[in-house]
Amino acid sequence: MKLPPSQLIEYIEYKGEPVASVRGKIISESSVSLTINGDIWLSFMCTPHDLEALAAGFLFNEGILQRREEIAIVRPCEDATNVDVWLDHPVEKPAQWRRTSGCTGGVTSPQAVEQTSGINSGDFLPARQLLGWMDRLLEAQALYRETRGVHCSILTDGEHILASAEDIGRHNTLDKIAGKILLQSIRANRFILLTTGRISSEMLQKSARIGASILVSRTSPTSLSIQLAREFGITLVGYARRNQFNVYAHPERLGLPALDTARIEIPTVQPISV
């Protein structure tokens, strides 16, 4: 049976005596396998929603495909436990995967960063305008309002929301957005990403693949994501609230003073097999 994005359950609520039995919604979590040209590659731990976008976006962010036209078929099975993708060309499964810091144990291939280009756009967004987009991010969290415990990301051009995605995995939200860009042929003069999740190196790499010149989170970046943002040319913003934020890379896009970009040492990350 196909799982909905959220499920109604009964639980005990404790707020002192007496306790109460209540009914409420929780976020769904499911294991969904990804099959490419008939071969199973891996399994996502995800919210079983927007699975076509998740599969297409993951393959794009990993550098496996570059264009929508390469996809002949992308189709979840009826019970949503597998997404079947057929490409118009043969493709080799990566020999190694590297564990990401995703909360549901995501993976990426060592070749993903090699397939990612820097962002050279000189676009400008006033700092005060950026703060207003944090309210729009909160408004887009439909599943979060129902269940809590779920991440949300939105894509904007600075004027309109172009795509949004919610999932238990923060990295899955960016794969879903990448998939929507690909499958819906979304175009804009610039891409700005806002997310509720922590910005780790794989989140930064996915943002670069998407082509986002500005990446904003309401929580923290990691040291490696800051270094990559400086190298890729991405304006990286963390701890964004309604009246404040921190900028860790390329503040000039927001009309703010330049940073002393002293190098942060990058630890060696060993690939693993799964």
Image (spheres, helix red, strand yellow):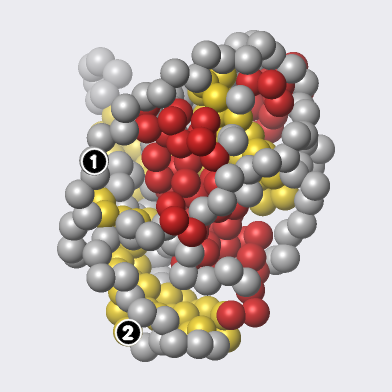
Left or right? Give the position of 90 relative to 44: right
Cα separation, mark 2 vs mark 1, equals 31 Å
**Disc ID at residue 268:** 1
Residue 177, placed above or below residue 122: below
The circle on residue 220 is none
Place residue 161 in its image quadrant: top right
**Residue drawn where x is 59% and y is 80% of the image:** 70
Residue drawn at x 72%, y 49% is 162
Are there few (<14), some (14-19), or many (20+) residues within 10 Å of tag 2?
few
Instruction: Describe the element under mark 1 as helix, strand or loop.
Output: loop
- Residue 259 position in % (x across, y down): 56, 15
Q: Amino acid at mark 1?
A: Thr
The residue positioned 33% from the left and 76% from the top of the image is 93
Q: Earlier in the sequence, mark 2 or mark 1?
A: 2
Q: Is residue 101 above or below residue 177?
A: above
Q: Can residue 163 be seen in this snapshot?
A: yes
Instruction: Give the residue at mark 2.
Output: 39
Residue 174 pos. (x, y %)? 51, 50
Quadrant housing the C terminus: bottom left
Res. 159 image quadrant = top right
Q: Is residue 54 visible?
A: no
Question: Where residue 246 sits in the image (x, y, percent)?
Answer: 54, 15
Secondary structure of the residue carrying numbered label 2: strand
